[in-house]
């Protein structure tokens, strides 16, 4: 069985695939029956649908690049792990994150015989309504990760 430390490597591979605009590599991080809920709340079920969805996004536009900080990785049960992270996005041509799209990500990973795979990924806007100082603090923290 793969090591728990490999869960963060899986997450980093997922972000690297996004940043490379590689839908196939993104999809390879998922279990066949994996799912995701995007930043806008769009649910996508199954690896093949996830690859198709991302292929369309990458073909039609140049998405922003992820910057992330992993907050926690823990095993929930044998072969099931939870990763919590915060992310910011640097728009194409920019050098700084756009605080309005900071997000919290939760990833549930499942162990196969040789690797971890994403069972579910969810992105939630980190808007912190009424708390602009929290938005600023998270943005500063993510900027430090980007350096």
Image (spheres, grey):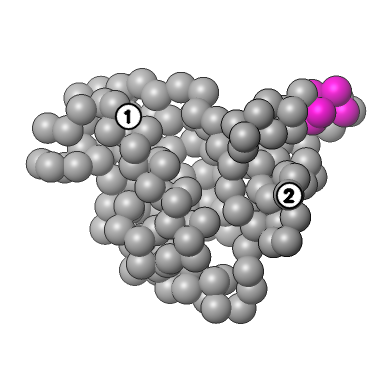
Q: Which residue does the numbered mark 2 point to in the structure image?
A: 95
For the residue labelled by badge 2, is the local secondary structure a helix, a strand or a loop? loop
For the residue labelled by badge 1, is the local secondary structure a helix, a strand or a loop? strand
Q: Are marks 2 and 1 in contact (CB under 8 Å)?
A: no
Q: Quadrant of residue 105?
A: top right
**Residues rendered magenta in the picture:** 132-136
Task: Classify residue 131 as left or right of residue 53.
Answer: right
Label 2 – label 1 distance at C-alpha: 33 Å
**Residue at image point 26% right, 26% down:** 4
Residue 86 visible, this angle: no
Residue toward you, 84 or 9? 9
Which residue is at the far front? 147
Quadrant of the image for the N terminus? top left
The image's mark for residue 81 is: 1
Please state the horizontal and vertical placement of residue 5, each as a whole percent of the image: 29, 26
**Residue at image point 39% right, 24% down:** 73
Task: Classify residue 131 as left or right of residue 81.
Answer: right
Task: Classify residue 30 as left or right of residue 140.
Answer: left
Task: Classify residue 75 as left or right of residue 120.
Answer: left
**Residue at image point 32% right, 22% down:** 76
């Amino acid at each position: 069985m793969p090591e728990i430390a490999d869960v963060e490597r899986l997450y980093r591979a997922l972000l690297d695939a996004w940043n490379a605009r590689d839908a196939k590599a993104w999809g390879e991080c998922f279990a066949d029956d994996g799912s995701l809920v995007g930043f806008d709340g769009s649910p996508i079920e199954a690896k093949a649908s996830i690859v198709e969805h991302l292929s369309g996004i990458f073909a039609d536009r140049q998405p922003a690049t992820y910057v992330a900080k992993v907050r926690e990785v823990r095993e929930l049960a044998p072969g099931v792990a939870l990763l919590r992270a915060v992310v910011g996005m640097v728009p194409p041509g920019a050098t700084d994150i756009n605080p309005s799209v900071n997000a919290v990500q939760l990833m549930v990973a499942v162990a196969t015989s040789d690797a971890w795979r994403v069972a579910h990924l969810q992105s939630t806007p980190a808007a912190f309504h009424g708390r602009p100082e929290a938005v600023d603090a998270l943005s500063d923290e993510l900027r430090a990760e980007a350096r």
